[in-house]
Image (spheres, rainbow, N blue to C red):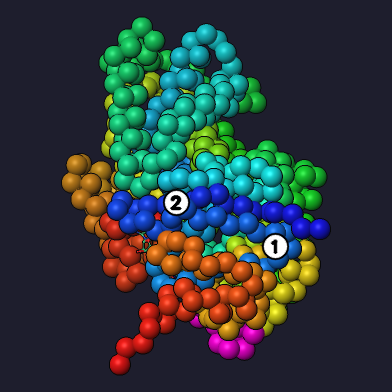
Amino acid sequence: MMSVLLQSKNISKHYGGIKAVQNVDMQVEKGEIYGIIGPNGAGKTSFFNVCTGNLQPNGGEIWFDGKKITGMRPAQIATLGMARTFQNIQLFNFMTVLENIKIGFHIHEKTNIFDAIVHNKRYKTDEKMNHEKGVALLEKLGLSEHAETLAGNLAYGVQRRVEIARALALDPKILLLDEPAAGMNPIETQNLSDFIKQLRNDGYTIIVIEHDMKFVMNLCDRILVLNFGQKICEGNPEHVKNDKLVNEAYFGKGTTF
Amino acid sequence: MIDKIKNFYTQHKTLVILGLIVMALILPLLIQKSSIMSIIVKMLFYVILASSLNIINGYSGQFNIGHAGFVLIGSYTLAILAQLNISVWILYPLAGVVTAILGLLIALPTLRLRGIYLALVTLGFSEILRLVALNWTSLTGGPMGIKGIPSPWLFGLQSTKPHIYYYIVLAFVIICLFTSYRVINSKVGRAWMSIREDDHAAMSLGVDIKKYKAINFMFGAFWAGVGGALMAPFYKFIDSTMFSLDEGFNILSMVIIGGQGTLIGPVVGSVVVNSITEIFRFADEARLLVYAILIISMMWIRPQGLAGTSKSVIANRGIGSKKTNIFTRIFDKKGVK
Ligand SMILES: Nc1ncnc2c1ncn2[C@@H]1O[C@H](COP(=O)(O)OP(=O)(O)OP(=O)(O)O)[C@@H](O)[C@H]1O
Ligand SMILES: [Mg+2]
C-alpha cells in the first residue's frame, strides 16, 4: 500500500522578476526514490529549498507526512523528519567528521544547559548515544578512518558522504539530496547509487536532484523534470527518456546544422 | 611557540590545570604589596568578563560590542540591593540572574540580526544603560554614584583587602571556566558552534537558531553580571563612568587578543591587556594606541588570537586571510544554495 509522504501543491517561487519555480505539483510516495532533473537554472534547488523551508514560496503549499509545513522554519521541518544535503556542501569545515555527525544527532538529544553543568544522567545518556551511534554511522558509510579529520580537509567525494551521514543522523523519514554525485568519480558514484538503494531498503524515502542522467535513470523509481521553473514531465525513467518535451529541453528543438 | 604550548597543554591537561590552580592558590602568599595584588584581582575580574563575552562572540559567532552594559547591570544590582542589607553572597548570583534576564530581553528582538547590525544594537543598548545609570539619580545616585558598597565576610574576615578578596574572585573564575567548559562540551555548546560555523547547515539539522542564540546571550550575560557584581564591593564605589563604551572595547580587545572560541583565550587576553595597561599607565591615553596596533596586527597575523582556535571560521576571518576578509565576513549575508 502506497501513501503520500511529501506533496507540493502548485508551488511557485520568484526572485524579483525571475520565475524560478512555477506552479509545480509533486507527490512523493513513502519508500520511493524520486528524482528531480532539469537543465542548469531550471529551478531544482529553489524547489528543494521551498520544500525544506529554507525559502518561502510565493504561492502554493507543501504537505509533509499529513501536515502542512509551508511557513514553518527549516529547523522545525527537520524535527518533523526531513533531512537534506546541499548542492555546495555545507559541512562544518573546521570541525572533525565525528563532531559534524554529533550535531546531526541534535534533535535526538535532551540535554539542557543545567544537565550539561551537573553531568547528570540525561547528559551522560546523550553523550554515550551520540558517540556510539556516531561511530556506527561512520562505519556504515565507510568513513571511520576520517572520524578525526577536519571535514574541510577531505576530498570532495568524501565530503558528500559525510554530509549524507550527518543528515542520516537525524533519522529522517525523508532524505533530500541536492546533486550528491557532483564531484565524485565513477566508482564513487556507483557506490553512492548502491548506497541510496540500500537506504530505500532500510525504509527511507529519498528525493535526489542530479545532472548525471545514467545515475538518475538507474536509480529512481519516478522522475520529475523541470525546465524554466515548470514541470514538463513526470513518470518512470522509461517514460521520461522517451518524452518529446524532455528531449527538447535537453537537446534542443529539432536539429541545426 | 604558541602551538608548542598548546600541544603540551592538550597532552597534560589535568596536570596543567591542577598546577595552575595550586599556583593561583598560593599566589597571595608570594606577593606582599597590596597594589600589585589589586592589579591581579582586576585581572581576575576581566577573566570573567572576557570569558563571558567569548561565550557570545567566540562560541556562537555573534558580535556583541556593548558588553559593558551587562557588567553595569551586575554592578548596580549588587550595589543597590546591598543597601537593603541583603547578603553580598546572595547578591553575586542574583546579579547574574538579573543580567541574564536582561540579556534575554535584548536578545529577543535582535535574534534575526547578524554581524554589524547586532554590533550596533548592543553598542546602543550599552550606551542607553549608562545614560539611565547617570540620570536615574534616586536609584543609582546619578553622577554621585553609589558609595560604601559592603564586601562579604569570609571565614570571619571582612574581605576588603585584595589579598582576601582575591580568593572570592578566584572561586568565581574557577566556577565560570568550569561551567563554561561543561556547557561547551555538550549539546548546547555544539549547537552554538554549529551556528557560528554555518547557520544554514545548523538549521537543516534541526538546531533552533533563535533559541540557542538566546540561551547563549543569557549565559554570557549571566557571567558578565556576576563579574560586574564582584567588582562593586572591591572598589566600594561605582558610577556610570566605569561602564562606558571604552570599557566594552577594553573587554572586547581582551577577547580578540587572547583568542576567541577557546576557554583559555580570554584568560590570556586579560593578563596581556591588563599588563599593558599597567606598564603603559604613564603614557595615559596614548596607551590606546598600543591596543590598536596590537588588535590590528592580531587580525592580520593571527586572527584567532594568541590562544584562539585555528579550527574555526574565526581563524579565517583575518584581514590578511586569502579566503575572506573581516569586512566581507561582517557584512556577509550568506544565501542557501
Ligand atoms: N537567490 C537568488 N536570487 C536571484 N535569483 C536566483 C537565486 N537563486 C537562484 N536564482 C535563479 O533562479 C533560477 C533557478 O535556480 P536554481 O538554483 O533553483 O536552479 P537549479 O535547477 O538548481 O540549477 P543548477 O542545476 O545549476 O543547480 C536560476 O535562473 C537562478 O539564476
Ligand atoms: Mg541546483
Do we see residue A127 in this rendering?
A: no
**Residue drawn where x is 44% and y is 38% of the image:** B111
Q: Quadrant of residue A217?
A: bottom right
Of residues B146 and B124, the one drawn nearer to the viewer in this rendering: B124
Do residues under tags 1 and 2 come within 8 Å of each other at their CB atoms? no
- Which is nearer the N-term, disc 1 or disc 2? 2
Do we see residue A13 in this rendering?
A: yes
Q: Position of residue B19 (x, y in %)?
A: 62, 56
The question of residue A53 being in magenta is answered with: no
Mark 2 surroundings within 10 Å by alpha-carbon count, few (fewer than 14), some (14 through 19), many (20 or more):
many
Q: Secondary structure at mark 1?
A: strand
Look at the numbered disc 1 and say if its residue's Cβ is closer than 8 Å to ligand 2: no
**Label number found at residue A12:** 2
Q: Quadrant of residue B87?
A: top right
**Label number found at residue A205:** 1
Residue range corresponding to the magenta coloring: A182-190
Query: Vertical placement of B334 versus B126: above or below?
Result: below
The question of residue A186 being in magenta is answered with: yes
Of residues B40 and B270, the one drawn nearer to the viewer in this rendering: B270
Q: Tell me the subunit letter for badge 1.
A: A
Quarter of the image for the C terminus of chain A: give it. bottom left
